[in-house]
Amino acid sequence: MVFVSRLLLEKCREQKCDASFAFTDPTKAFHTINRPLLWNVLQRYGCPHKLLAMLRQFHDGMQARVTLGGDQSNYFNVQVGVKQSCVLAPFFFNVFLVAMTLLSRYDLNSEDGIPTRYRHDGSLFNLRRLKSLTKTQSTTLFQLQYADDCETLAHE
């Protein structure tokens, strides 16, 4: 992702357009997911009612406590996030991230992203071939995702 980001930044500088890149690391985001919104997203994606009710029950009444230097705090209620040890937590987060990405796209114009041209044949680094208008395709990039990293792109 860093390689692609640097290439995009280089191209924006060559074309004298301002670019903005926002990096986020969602690995610690499992505990920040808005659960009522997650249930709504799962319902809209067609999750069966019984399964959704079971998932809600699994997360309702979730409690935690803090351990520091051998001392433990009292239990407290956890109102947001999904259980860290749950095997479904990565799935929940991915569904939530996809839904948020799709929602953010509704607010964007095609001019907000970074336009790029590409082609599938030939040498990857043959820049003369990219100047050809006949065999190239174009797209607008709004976001890059790789493993657990996410980058939002924009230009003026």
Image (tube, rainbow, N blue to C red):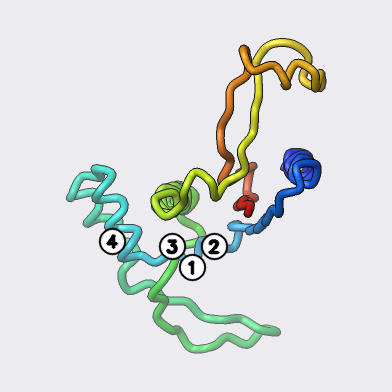
Tell me the crowding category of disc 3: few under 14, some 14 to 19, or many 20 or more residues within 10 angstroms, Cα based.
many
* Mark sitting on residue 56: 4
Q: Which residue in the protein does label 3 denote?
A: 82
The amino acid marked with disc number 1 is: Thr
Which of the image's four quarters has the N terminus?
A: top right
Q: Residue at x 79, y 47 (%)?
A: 13
Which of the image's four quarters has the C terminus?
A: bottom right
Helix, strand or loop at mark 3: loop
Pick whichever of labels 4 and 3 is earlier in the sequence. 4
Q: Residue at x 46, y 55 (%)?
A: 86
Tell me the crowding category of disc 4: few under 14, some 14 to 19, or many 20 or more residues within 10 angstroms, Cα based.
some
Q: Residue at x 61, y 52 (%)?
A: 154
Tell me the crowding category of disc 2: few under 14, some 14 to 19, or many 20 or more residues within 10 angstroms, Cα based.
few
Rounded to the nearest whole Å, what is the CA distance between mark 1 and mark 4?
16 Å
Q: Which residue in the protein does label 1 denote?
A: 32
The amino acid marked with disc number 4 is: Arg
Q: Nearer the viewer, mark 2 or mark 4?
A: 2
Pick whichever of labels 3 and 1 is earlier in the sequence. 1
The amino acid marked with disc number 2 is: Ala
Q: Which residue in the protein does label 2 denote?
A: 29
Tell me the crowding category of disc 1: few under 14, some 14 to 19, or many 20 or more residues within 10 angstroms, Cα based.
few
Please state which of residues 68 and 46 is positioned toward the viewer in this rendering: 46
Q: Is residue 97 above or below residue 60?
A: above
Rounded to the nearest whole Å, what is the CA distance between mark 2 and mark 3?
9 Å
The amino acid marked with disc number 3 is: Val
Rounded to the nearest whole Å, what is the CA distance between mark 2 and mark 1?
5 Å
Contact between labelled residues 4 and 2, with CB atoms less than 8 Å apart = no
Helix, strand or loop at mark 2: loop
Helix, strand or loop at mark 4: helix
